[in-house]
Amino acid sequence: MDQISNMIIMMKNASKAGRPTTAFPYSKMKHSIADCLKKEGYIVGLTKKMKKSVPMLEVELVYVDGVAKINDVERISKQSRRVYYGAKDIKPIKNGYGLLVLSTPKGIMSGKDARKEMVGGEALFKIW
């Protein structure tokens, strides 16, 4: 089972349902993805909590005038097919209204930051 896909789908479903927060099992990769989403304004806050001795990552979603900022997500690189982008291949998502999240040698970063740093990597997902 793909844990990153579960994470982004859980955030999308929670935002569609109007929930203020959602939680999923903790990992360093998910934490760094959530940090990137927080930096770009898709989530407000994130906390690591223990639930029945299992670490959980709880994220607080962003709503603008009652409308969720996360409308849809699309997983790009999967376990069966990895997709890599060079720095020059990174294009704006949804005419600049979306976000591409990449796993680069400098860590997890948005497409805009990766292009600025002139570094490519594995394209994880798109969010808008």
Image: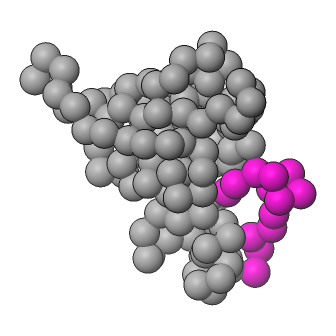
Judged left or right of residue 41, residue 126 is: right
Indicate the position of residue 118 as horizontal and vertical percent values.
63, 86
- Give the farthest residue toward the left: 53
Task: Give how far across and how far down residue 121 sits, in percent.
Answer: 56, 70
In the orientation shown, which residue stands out farthest toward the top?
Answer: 17
Q: Residue at x 53, y 42 (%)?
A: 43
Q: Looking at this view, is 62 or 101 the one in front?
A: 62
Indicate whether residue 113 is drawn in magenta: no
| Residue numbers of the magenta segment | 88-102
Please state, as top left, top right, bottom left or bottom right, where the N terminus lies in the image.
Answer: top left
- Name the residue at 43% across, 42% down: 45
Where is residue 84? Give x, y as percent.
Answer: 63, 65
List the single residue furthest toward the right.
95
Any part of residue 25 in sight: yes
Is residue 111 depicted above or below 17 in this figure?
below
State whether residue 127 is above or below residue 58: below
Depth order, front residue of 44/1: 44
Query: Residue 18 lies in what quarter of the image?
Result: top right
Residue located at (71% from left, 24% from top): 66
**Left of 18 or right of it: where is 98?**
right
Q: Using the image as rendered, state which of residue 27 and residue 51 is in the foreground.
A: 51
User: If the image is split into quadrants, where does the C terminus sit?
Assistant: top right
Specify how the rendered protein is coloured.
one colour
Q: Residue at x 60, y 57 (%)?
A: 40
Q: Residue furthest front?
A: 65
The number of callouts visible is: 0
For residue 2, side relative to residue 78 (left or right): left
Residue 100 on the magenta segment: yes
On screen, residue 79 above or below 107:
above
Q: Determine the image quadrant of residue 111.
A: bottom right
Whether residue 82 is visible to the viewer of this picture, yes or no, is: no
